[in-house]
Image (cartoon, rainbow, N blue to C red):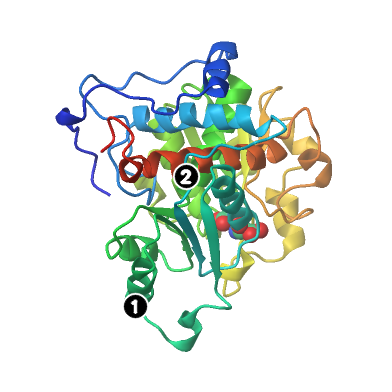
């Protein structure tokens, strides 16, 4: 994605979110507000959200700030807002997912959209339909926003080019998973009060991970020092081109880290031979209380889920409420997805300042 072009005509930032819950969330929060959007620049001038690459820090901050109102709303008994009423949201998932699909479905429903899920099993993709045909079909149904997951890197961008409505990437191959990186950034910002200046160690199967890629870009853009920690076979060969510090020794890699983000060992993306055995992987690269002692004393433990307990992380660490932010990540996921669905559909809804 090319870097966004400032749109001078769009005027000053218009939060557009409004709402009492939002105002309360802003006023009650002592967390730092977003880096100011430069004067005359639209707060989020993108039609789609295909990745984190190409986003400015203030655009990421804007989405995180927008998500705060939804964290507040989701903690009330009614949890409902009608701003997407009458809009159709299609969740087209060409790769298995339970958590992300559920999260996008809940997010759309809480905003009042008509949400339709299209899973791999029902889709004509199994019957040989090409990706372009699928895109044309989705477009003909006049959806207002499409959320896509696909096992091929770049497939979501290809579909986005062929449809008239905003497209949200819910994970494409090894490429990007932007809402995961946003929810991780929100979790870190709420727990630590900031992102800039923190040392974040992203550990495990970096090679196969779109979560790692999106997080490396997002956290780096927000000013964190990012390390990646992986055995040599799971370290991407081009890692030097991303601004991270690579480590193959786990304990050295997490030494003094403020955040230890574990990744799932992606067995479905391995043809074999990447790790000698899960036992050995756990011994050297699994997060245990003993290994966590090398990180900063108040280090936050994260995992995007689903977890392989006893492989990349032991249960006692994953379930420790003092250290682990794993369930909070799931909670932030719904709020971040509500923010993205709201912001990306503002132009279609004719929200002032977004037309
Ligand atoms: N990778 C999948 C997801 O994020 C895992 C799952 O569905 O449980 O949704
Ligand atoms: N749920 C994340 C994803 O879809 C992480 C994972 O599956 O390991 O990429």
The answer, for residue 317, to whether it is visible in the render is yes
26 left or right of 293 in image: left
Quadrant assignment, res 330: top right
- In the depicted view, which residue is nearer to us: 108 or 121? 108
Residue 116 location (% of width, % of height): 54, 62
Q: Residue at x 65, y 34 (%)?
A: 74
- In the depicted view, which residue is nearer to us: 220 or 92? 92
Q: Residue at x 57, y 16 (%)?
A: 24
Report the residue marked by disc 1: 133
183 left or right of 55 in image: right
- In the depicted view, which residue is nearer to us: 253 or 72? 72
The answer, for residue 255, to whether it is visible in the render is no
Quadrant assignment, res 41: top left
Which dot marks residue 162?
Answer: none
Residue 63 location (% of width, % of height): 44, 33
Mark 1 → mark 2, Cα distance in angstroms: 27 Å
| Secondary structure at numbered mark 2 | loop
The quarter of the rendering in which ligand 1 is drawn is bottom right
Q: Is mark 1 within 8 Å of ligand 2?
A: no
| Secondary structure at numbered mark 1 | helix
113 left or right of 60 in image: right
Q: Mark 1 and 2 residues: CB-CB less than 8 Å, in contact?
A: no
Ranked by sequence position, the earlier of labels 1 and 2 is 2
Question: Which residue, as the protein is rendered here, is positioned at the far right?
Answer: 316
Report the residue marked by disc 2: 84
Residue 14 location (% of width, % of height): 33, 24
Quadrant assignment, res 188: top right
């Amino acid at each position: 994605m090319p870097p966004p072009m400032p749109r001078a005509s769009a005027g000053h930032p218009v939060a557009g979110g409004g709402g009492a819950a939002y105002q309360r969330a802003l006023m009650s929060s002592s967390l730092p507000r977003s880096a100011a959007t430069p004067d005359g620049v639209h707060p989020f001038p993108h039609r789609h959200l295909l990745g984190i690459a190409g986003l400015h820090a203030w655009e990421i901050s804007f989405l995180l700030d927008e998500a705060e109102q939804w964290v507040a709303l989701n903690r009330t008994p009614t949890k409902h807002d009608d701003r997407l009423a009458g809009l159709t949201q299609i969740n087209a998932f060409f790769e298995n997912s339970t958590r992300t699909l559920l999260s996008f479905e809940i997010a759309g429903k809480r905003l009042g959209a008509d949400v339709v899920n299209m899973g791999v099993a029902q889709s004509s993709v199994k019957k040989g339909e090409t990706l372009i045909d699928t895109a044309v079909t989705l477009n003909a149904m006049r959806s207002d926003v499409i959320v896509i997951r696909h096992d091929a890197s770049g497939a979501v961008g290809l579909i986005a080019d062929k449809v008239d409505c905003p497209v949200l990437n819910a994970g494409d191959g090894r490429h990007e998973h932007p809402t995961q990186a946003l929810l991780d950034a929100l979790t870190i910002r709420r727990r630590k009060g900031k992102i800039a200046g923190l040392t974040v160690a992203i550990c495990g199967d970096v090679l196969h991970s779109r979560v790692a890629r999106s997080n490396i870009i997002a956290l780096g853009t927000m000013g964190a020092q990012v390390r990646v920690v992986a055995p040599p076979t799971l370290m991407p060969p081009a890692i030097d081109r991303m601004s991270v510090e690579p480590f193959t020794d786990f304990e050295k890699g997490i030494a003094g880290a403020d955040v230890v983000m574990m990744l799932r060992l992606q067995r479905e993306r391995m043809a074999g031979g990447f790790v000698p055995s899960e036992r050995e992987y756990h011994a050297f690269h699994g997060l245990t209380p003993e290994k966590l002692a090398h990180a900063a004393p108040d280090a936050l433990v994260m995992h995007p889920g689903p977890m392989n307990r006893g492989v990349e992380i032991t249960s006692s660490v994953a379930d420790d409420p003092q250290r682990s932010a794993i369930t909070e990540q799931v909670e932030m996921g719904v709020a971040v997805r509500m923010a993205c669905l709201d912001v990306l559909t503002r132009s279609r809804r004719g929200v002032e300042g977004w037309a």
